[in-house]
Each structure stands twice: as C-alpha cells, then as structure tokens.
Amino acid sequence: MTKIGVMICGHGSRSQAAVDEFAVLAEKLPPLLPPEWEVDYGYLEFANPVIRAGLDRLRDKGCERILAVPGMLFAAMHAKNDIPTVLNTYAAEHGIEVSYGRELGVDPKMVAAAGARIRAAVAEADARSGPVPLEETCLVVIGRGASDPDANGNVAKIARLLHEGLGFGWCEVGYSGVTFPLVEPALEHAAKLGYRRVVVFPYFLFTGVLIDRIYGFADMVAEAHPEIRFVKAGYLNDHPQVLATFAERVTEILDGPPAMNCGMCKYRAQVLGFEAEVGSPQESHHHHVEGQGAQAPGSNVADCRLCDDFCTGACRLDMDHGHGHGHHHHDHAHDHGHDHGHSHGHSHDHHHDHDHHHPPYPHADHPLGPESVRKHLKDRS
C-alpha cells in the first residue's frame, strides 16, 4: 500500500497568534482522516515551517504520495499560482507524487460555520444590550480582498447566503485590502441605511493584522455613529464545520482531480476588466519572504509611522516610500511603515524585483479602495 501524507498549505502571517491558530487547525484535522495517514503543514510566506519543510517531514516518515490542499477560503493568486509552483517544484526535485486539492470555497458547511459565529455574536449582543430584530439589523461581511474578481465574487455569494439564510434586513460586503469597497467605506455606507444594529462579520479563517484592521475600523465608525449598535462577530477559526470541510477537500482528491472554480478564473477566461491576464504564467512571488517569521520588521503597529492603534493599510499608498509600488496594490498586509525599498526591507541578497510580476489592478485608484485610507493620513498631519 502506498503511504499517504497530507500537506496543509497555509499562507503564513506576521501575527504569531494567526500562526498558532493555523497550527491548532492542523492538529485537529488528523482525527477526521484515515488513521494511517500522516498530516503536516507549512506556510507560503513569513512564518515557519515553510511548505518545503513540511513536505520533507512527510517524506522522512515514508510517505510516497502527498495530498496537498490550500488552507485558504477562496482561490486567488496564492492558491492558483504560488502554492502550486512550490508543490510542483518540490515534486520534480524529489520524484514524489503530489496531488493538489481545491480551496474551501463556497460550501454549505462553511456557510453553517459562518452562520454560527454570527448567531453567537447576535445572541451575546441581545443579552448585553437588549434584543434587536434581525429585520432591523444590517449584516456587513468583510472578506480578504484580492486582485482576482472570482475570489471577491465568492465573498459576495457567501454574504448573500448568510443574508438570506439568517434573515437580516440588509447586507453589505467589504474587503480588507486590494479591491473596493474597503472596510471603512463599507461600514460608513451601512451606517447611512438607517438600521438600528450593524453586525460586522470577518469571513476569515484566522486572526492577524487584517482582523485587527476590520475591528479597528468598526470601532472608529461606531464611535462616529453612537445611535447605531455595532456588533463585532468572531471569525471562523477552528469551527467543527471548517474542519469537516478541510477533511473533505483532502479525501476528495482520491476521487479524481478536484478542479478549482475555473469558469470565472481570470487566468483562463476573459473576465470583464481583467482580460489581459488570460494565460499568465503559473509562478510564485513569495520566496522573498519565505520563512521570515512573525517577528520580522513591520510585524506590529508599534513600529509603524503611519498608524496608531491598528494597521489601516496606509503604507500601501506608497507614502514616503519613493518607489513605483503603489498602484498595483498587491497587499501583503505586512508593511507597517518599515523601510520599503527595492529589496523590501528584508535581509535577502537577491533584491527580488517585485513590481514586474503583477499586472496593475484595474481599479487601484477607486476612491472606496485603498485610496480611501488617505483621509487618515491627512488627519495625522
């Protein structure tokens, strides 16, 4: 019998809490899989262990076939390009079979997990400050935000399923970076709609700088609108239904190649506004921060010249950086005002030129996207 190993491929974070939460998820997954399978994990960037190290450990345990899945909600550049490149390179170098599964995606179990987090937050708010009918409540779902409209569209689909499934009066969708509307514009818009309560739900797996950003902006908007009750729901984390979805993504690989949603993939189809990216090469852009670690420079707001209490994303606007990185807005969510020169302020020697890899995001200057952060910079000056 071929010994099977399972590789959970995470993005990685400069937040140690996020790295710890991902590790806990990987530890809770084995009981949902056949007992003879080995399970390991690794990160694409920032954190250790890196993906290659996890693959090495599986080989050392005698695994002859690897079932790898992206530890990500939706498939954008990281799941479609970066992780497959790492896996394909490793498989070719070591002569081992690595089969790649699909992202968590739009799945009834994921919607159930999200609904449970929202219901818990509403119940707590009802107990604390009195009940408000859901019909008089606006749900705001915040997704990661990507340069891939397919992934962004899936956030909107999840939001609609939650809106309709739970019966909220209204629903708005926002994103933590890259695209539009960002968190604050989305919340400001929701505050204008006349609802008594606004529930802010981050559709994220783990904590980190982006969760801090979402909750930070929620506090800011709540302070400006004391007549509205703002409720901050918890993110998905290791909800049992999330774990069940991960296990399904692994086991379904054995049933055949589980394709990601390719019908609206900007690398395969001419998606409105992104036509130039059809046929882009599959390559990874993250070896320059591989294994940097959660304590790397720029990992906390205390080091930031532009933010006070939480990361607003202001550094993505290229303020005081002096290079042409500002308009493609490939938001790594880690640049807290540190030296962001040509070599990204890290200790690498190869001076990886980051700009030439990414096509410009077509709406980088949208006033409700990253440009919306500029007013905070003006307030500080």
Image (spheres, rainbow, N blue to C red):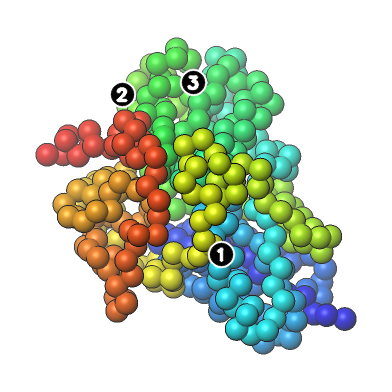
The residue wearing badge 3 is 197
Quadrant assignment for the C terminus: top left
**For residue 224, which numbered disc appears in the image?**
2
Q: Amino acid at mark 2?
A: Ala
Compared with 7, 105 (above or below) is above
For the residues marked 3 and 2, what is the alpha-carbon distance in whole angstroms?
14 Å
Q: Earlier in the sequence, mark 3 or mark 1?
A: 1
**Front position among marks 3 and 1:** 1
Closer to the camera, 299 or 152? 152
Q: Residue at x 31, y 36 (%)?
A: 365
**Label 2: few (<14), some or many (≥20) within 10 Å?**
few
For the residues marked 2 and 1, what is the alpha-carbon distance in whole angstroms?
42 Å
Q: With 267 as the anchor, is 379 left or right in this view?
A: left
For the residues marked 3 and 1, what is the alpha-carbon distance in whole angstroms?
40 Å
Q: With 333 as the anchor, is 381 left or right in this view?
A: left
The residue wearing badge 1 is 83
Closer to the camera, 240 or 348? 348
Q: Secondary structure at mark 3?
A: strand
Q: Secondary structure at mark 1?
A: helix
> In which quadrant of the rendered view does residue 264 lie?
top right
> In which quadrant of the rendered view does residue 57 lie?
bottom right
Q: Amino acid at mark 1?
A: Ile
Q: With 136 as the anchor, is 375 left or right in this view?
A: left
Q: Secondary structure at mark 2?
A: helix
Q: Earlier in the sequence, mark 3 or mark 2?
A: 3
